Image (tube, helix red, strand yellow):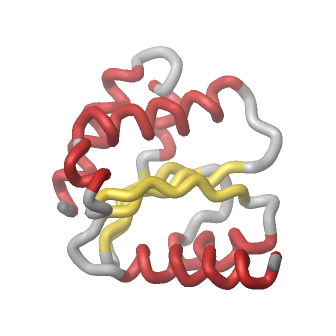
Amino acid sequence: MKKVLFTLTILLLGTALYAGGNVEVYYFHYTRRCATCEAVETESIKALKQLYAKEVQNGKVKFFSVNLDKKESKIPAKRCKADGQSLLVMSGNKRIDLTEEGFMYARSNPEKLKQAIKQAVDAVL
């Protein structure tokens, strides 16, 4: 069962990463997370649902939370060139790194993070 789930996870992430016209937002993290780390994920999901409700619902915009401590995270991390905690907007071969904005604004100014996400997603949508 674990092998089946592992295979499906890899296929889903691999397909999502290379599906042209779609936008994938990846949050790479470790198992142990501080309040800021958790806020980056929470605020990113909230921003996507508020800004792109229709696109999220129809699968054009997707969010993936990837735990770097798990074996199955190695393939998506390599494809996204994520070597540590990262917030990335991906579409085809386009990659926008919002890690700095995520950690700077998730707790202190979530609206600024929301605007950075909007600008990045709009650029690749």
* Residue farthest toward the top in the current orientation of the protein: 108
**Is 99 positioned to the left or the right of 59 in the image?**
right
Q: Which quadrant holds residue 66?
A: bottom right
* Quarter of image, res 70: bottom right
Q: Nearer the viewer, residue 111 or 14?
A: 14
Q: Is residue 75 above or below residue 24?
A: below
In the figure, 98 relative to 41: above or below?
below
User: Residue 11 placed where, x, y %?
Assistant: 55, 83
Query: What x and y, as percent, mark residue 120?
Result: 27, 50
| Front-lying residue, 81 or 29 | 29
Residue that appears at 62% across and 80% down:
8
Residue at (34, 34) in percent of width and height: 47
- In the image, residue 38 sits, relative to residue 117, either above or below, namely above
- Percent position (x, y) of residue 58? 26, 59
Q: Quadrant of the N terminus?
A: bottom right
Q: What residue is shown at x 66% (from left), y 64% (from top)?
A: 83
Picture residue at 52% right of the left edge, 76% below the top: 12
Quadrant where the image shows the C terminus: bottom left
Give how far across and how far down residue 78 sits, in percent: 61, 77
